[in-house]
Amino acid sequence: LLQSMTFRLVLEEIALALQLLLGFYVTGVLDDCLCDIDSIDNFNTFKIFPKIKKLQERDYFRYYKVNLKRPCPFWAEDGHCSIKDCHVEPCPESKIPVGIKAGSSTKYLKVANSTKELEDCEQANKLGAVNSTLSNQSKEAFIDWARYDDSQDHFCELDDERSPAAQYVDLLLNPERYTGYKGSSAWRVWNSIYEENCFKPRSVYRPLNPLAPSRGLCLEKRVFYKLISGLHASINLHLCANYLLEETWGKPSWGPNMKEFKRRFDPVETKGEGPRRLKNLYFLYLIELRALSKVAPYFERSIVDLYTGNVEEDADTKTLLLNIFQDTKSFPMHFDEKSMFAGDKKGAKSLKEEFRLHFKNISRIMDCVGCDKCRLWGKLQTQGLGTALKILFSEKEIQKLPENSPSKGFQLTRQEIVALLNAFGRLSTSIRELQNFKVLLQHSR
């Protein structure tokens, strides 16, 4: 009898451990699309992650221009985080590749790249990165483009790159990780996002428990809600995976923090919400993956050069980028964005504008983040998602792009390109880190 009771207790212990473990193994088909999670895991691990990681190390994608001094437009700031790991080290002007600093918007187009490098750098800036050797007709085309881009409806509040406060940041030297920034200041940012700017059922009150069933919401509002939740989950995964574990003799040690991961995603500690948060991460990945597959024709044109001034590296960077685009187009279970805003034209237009304004407001909230490093990565990932949405809602314009000249119908600035690929790189890393946590969880059992 004693042996039987002991055996039963062991079985119950094993069953409980498996139940907790499987809570992190989000599986099955995602809501609102026909894609299963295992397919995304395999696709990301074996095709996307190694290539996107390599792309982020290229000069074109590692330097991001950002204004971290813009004031919070919604409330008086508590003051910036004084923790040393919150600090962002701007990149000295001398370290920026000449092809990048010579022009902010058009320097990925071959027609704009025939400047005499450093000699024409200052003049190129004055012309808005229009090469002084271009014909008047070409200059006018770029000016029309800039005018169109300035008036275009963006999903994000964009930084003014010409502002003296805007600085280049080397993303590789300022990695996203846990800085110690937390408490009421961080809570207020997410509270404002969920409570004031996110579509949600009226029954949901708590902002940091936002993933209640979304009955009563139309597809578009459910999508919006999942995008924000997925972004939140992704950021939390980055912080858990790169946590300050200890600091000995001034040398910090960073690595995965299992306790923090469980606090944010364990089905028991989160009362069942953790797995849904992780599912929304996969949904966001799928949305940005779809945007990359849709925008591929824009970059496949011979006019697009991803210019830094290093001809050989620029060619390799474009080859790698096009290779990634081929992979994104090969994925068989994309989200169908055509199912969105498909009702009557007037109602669909109104809903789309509401969708855009909500997201634009969220991008403005990123200027309220007190930690500079958190603000940097929040702004970049928000702009990347905003760029993905811009792409998904511009399919017809992308299909009409001319091969050898700028188009007034659809353009991307260099900042949008850098944000788009780095934001997707962060999602790819999140899903890869989730696999690592599953392995650690198995070993801890």
Image (cartoon, rainbow, N blue to C red):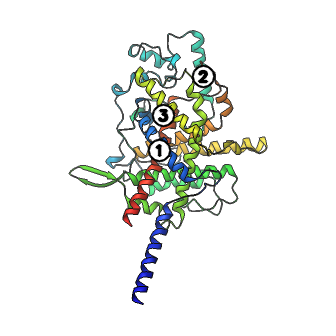
Left or right: 143 as drawn, with respect to 305:
right
Q: Disc 3 marks which residue?
A: 418
Which comes before the other along the chain, label 3 or label 1?
A: 1
In percent of width and height, residue 247 lies at 26, 53
Q: Disc 1 marks which residue?
A: 46
Q: Nearer the viewer, residue 271 or 128?
A: 271
In percent of width and height, residue 409 lies at 65, 26
Q: Nearer the viewer, residue 237 or 134?
A: 237
Which comes before the other along the chain, label 3 or label 2?
A: 2
In percent of width and height, residue 410 lies at 62, 28
In three-dimensional space, the C-alpha distance between marks 3 and 2, rounded to whole angstroms, equals 19 Å
The amino acid type, in three-letter code, at marker 1 is Phe
Q: Nearer the viewer, residue 118 or 397?
A: 397
Q: Which mark is residue 145?
A: 2
Q: Are marks 3 and 2 in contact (CB under 8 Å)?
A: no
| 3 vs 2, front mark | 3
Q: Residue furthest left?
A: 249
Which residue is drawn at the image coordinates 53% and 51% (left, top)?
281
Question: Picture quarter containing residue 8?
Answer: bottom left
Secondary structure beneath disc 3?
A: helix
Q: Residue furthest bottom?
A: 1
Q: Looking at the figure, which quarter contains the C terminus?
A: bottom left
Which residue is drawn at the image coordinates 46% and 29% (left, top)?
163
The amino acid type, in three-letter code, at marker 2 is Trp
Which comes before the other along the chain, label 1 or label 2?
A: 1
Question: Picture quarter containing residue 272?
Answer: bottom right
